[in-house]
Image (cartoon, rainbow, N blue to C red):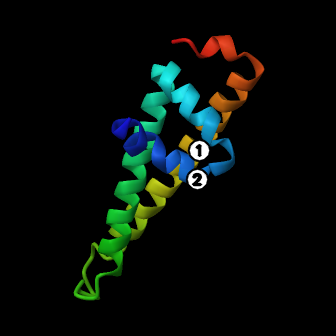
């Protein structure tokens, strides 16, 4: 159960009104588990890069100054795309709950 909390927790935090559906689908569907894992890892990476971006000891004139901002944007886009996939999986599960058995 701890693994489920670690992996599905960020998804549940993002969509708390769908917590029961997320937990059920997580237990039944390997692909959904992988989506949740990707979401959790992407969220952690985004937090990491935001922290790097806000460090004051970064050289102001460094050519890589925009790199953290570009990486942050890429992770934000990826997080959004994963949210769309997760919502689609949840909607499909509502339409056909028997299809979740994977």
Circles 1 and 2 in contact, beta carbons < 8 Å = yes
Closer to viewer: mark 1 or mark 2:
2
Can the viewer see residue 14 in this picture? yes
User: Eyeballing the image, is 36 above or below 31?
Assistant: below
Q: Nearer the viewer, residue 35 or 67?
A: 35
In percent of the image, x 45 and y 21: which residue is there? 30
The x and y percentages for residue 69 are 41, 69
Measure how far apart labels 1 and 2 are at the Cα level: 9 Å
Image quarter hosting the N terminus: top left
**Residue placed under numbered mark 2 in the picture:** 14
In the image, farthest residue toward the front: 1
Within 10 Å of disc 1 (Cα), the crowding (few <14, some 14-19, many 20+) is some
Q: Is residue 62 shown left or right of residue 81?
A: left
Residue 15 in the image, given as x and y percentages of width and height: 63, 49
Q: Position of residue 7 (x, y in %)?
A: 40, 41
Q: Is residue 81 left or right of residue 35?
A: right
The disc label shown at residue 93, or none: none
Using the image as rendered, state which of residue 16 and residue 14 is in the foreground. Answer: 16
Q: Which residue is mark 1?
A: 83
The answer to whether 94 is drawn above or below residue 54 in the figure is above
* Left or right: 68 as drawn, with respect to 99: left
Residue drawn at the location 69% of the way across and 17% of the way down: 97
């Amino acid at each position: 159960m701890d693994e489920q909390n670690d992996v599905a927790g960020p998804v549940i935090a993002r969509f708390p009104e769908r917590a029961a559906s997320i937990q059920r689908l997580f237990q039944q569907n390997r692909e959904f588990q992988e989506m949740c894992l990707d979401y959790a890892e992407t969220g952690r990476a985004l937090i990491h890069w935001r922290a790097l971006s806000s460090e004051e000891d970064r050289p102001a004139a460094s050519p890589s100054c925009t790199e953290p901002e570009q990486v942050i944007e890429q992770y934000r886009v990826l997080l959004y795309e994963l949210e769309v996939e997760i919502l689609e999986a949840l909607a499909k599960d509502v339409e056909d709950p028997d299809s979740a058995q994977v």
